[in-house]
Image (cartoon, rainbow, N blue to C red):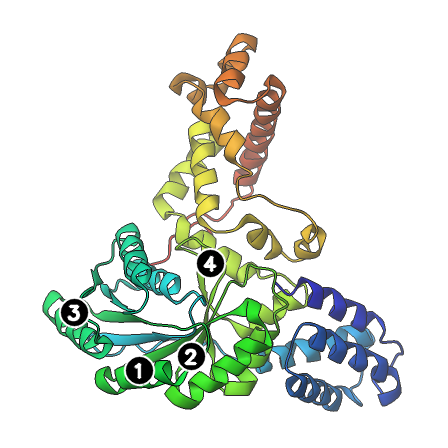
Amino acid sequence: MFENLSDRLDRSFKLLKGEGRITEINVAETLKDIRKALLDADVNYKVAKTFTDTVKEKALGQNVLTAVKPSQLMVKIVHDELTALMGGETADIDLKNNPSVILMSGLQGSGKTTFSGKLAKMLKDKKGKHPLLVADDIYRPAAIEQLKVLGEQIGVPVYSEPENKNPIQIAQNAIKQAKQSGNDVVIIDTAGRLAIDEQMMNEIASIKAAVKPDEILFVVDAMTGQDAVNTAKEFNDRLDFQGVVLTKLDGDTRGGAALSIRAVVNKPIKFVGTGEKMEAIDPFHPNRMADRILGMGDIVSLVERAQEQYDEEEARLLQKKIAKNQFDFNDFLSQIHQIKKMGNLKDLASMIPGVGKAIKDLDIDDDAFKSIEAIIHSMTPAERTNPGILNGSRRARIAKGSGTAVSEVNKLLKQFEETRKMMKMMTTAKIPGKGGFMKKRK
């Protein structure tokens, strides 16, 4: 997401010439190009105009320090305004009551059901909650089954009444069940339509009036561009929701919805979905998104994802093994599994400053580790623990067993040895383990 916009903005900043001060003359072409870049990214026209007018007002007459170029100062101003445009601060959900009721709203196909499962998993794993998912879509039988499958997958109970055609009653009964079962969060997955209609709006408004949710989240597919913003406005006019969820941000989207929706409905984006996996959900941080749009990466989010996967004690033991040169293929395989849990590989790489632009045209397959895993799984326990015994005949057997060529096995062994040497060197430089990068967050 935002790759085209990032490129266009980067080119816009390069247009800015001059020294000493930013003037109306030397900034005119840059602002014109920035506005065109925003419009091409499907940002609302009024939002784009207001944005560039504000940037112009803040930029004109700014003194440029001798150590800073005009383009660098403009990047700073644009970054601050992008952050403000997307809400300024991170907005959390309201979970004060017991049970807290979260009502999901949105059109059919926006990803409401999948996101409901992701949210339940996040609240369960990261906040220690005991959520109850409610299948309240009475029109699409597959929605009930889909939610049950997701619930089983993430270990969260699902409340449903397949024979009941009264969504208000189902929602009320689910809350009663939650109170009896000790569930402290109730997530109600409501019905959607292919387009907004009066029946749908009346129905979800009636559910809102009956259950008095603590939080109404509007789920929208980011790939629908300006249609997403228009739909959000109509839902907000009827429901007065508390926050927006943008799904499919990993898709081929220009990003206009993320930049426009906050300004149009004056409601914060609270979460983003970045993939199909149940772990692919992130709180929305306006400042970090501005970093990514301007090609600065998002190292904070990358570290947070790593912290969620790594255990402090495991990291300490691994550090000892590396220091003693005992890092083996079992440890290597474990590290691969940890990385895969962190999310989409291209998305992870784009969080590293400077890497996003370098890899934007590369097709990084999420199955990139598949052949490596196959090779390791074809080794015997002794071979994994002691790679030094891997002679020619063993390598040939491993290649045959993993469906790869001997050259691929040799390449992996060479990379493994180089990795082991590098990791040993890094441990002598005192990589933070205890209480640092590897520490698992509570």
Alpha carbon distance from label 1 to label 3: 22 Å
Taking the view exactly as shown, the residue that stands out farthest to the top is: 393
Q: Which residue is drawn at 56% across and 42% down?
A: 429
Screen quadrant of the C terminus: bottom left
Q: Residues within 10 Å of mark 2 (few under 14, many from 20)?
A: many
Closer to the camera in the image, 235 or 100: 235
Classify 10 Å Cα crowding around label 3: few (below 14), some (14-19), many (20 and above): many
Query: Label 4, on which residue?
Result: 304
> Which is nearer the N-term, disc 4 or disc 2?
2
- At label 4, the amino acid type is Glu
- Observer-side mark, 1 or 2, equals 1
Where 55 sits versus 384, above or below?
below
Residue 169 x %, y %: 18, 77
Residue at mark 3: 178
The nearer-to-camera label among 1 and 4 is 1
Q: Where is residue 126 in the image (x, y as percent from the top left)?
A: 33, 61
Above or below, 388 against 421 in this view is above
- Chain-order first, disc 1 or disc 2: 1
Per the image, label 3 sits on a secondary structure element best described as helix
Q: Distance between the residues labelled 1 and 2?
A: 20 Å
**Three-letter amino acid code of the residue under disc 1:** Glu
Residue 334: image quadrant is top left
Residue 59, position in %: x, y?
75, 86
Quarter of the figure with residue 316? top left
Label 2 close to label 3 by CB (< 8 Å): no
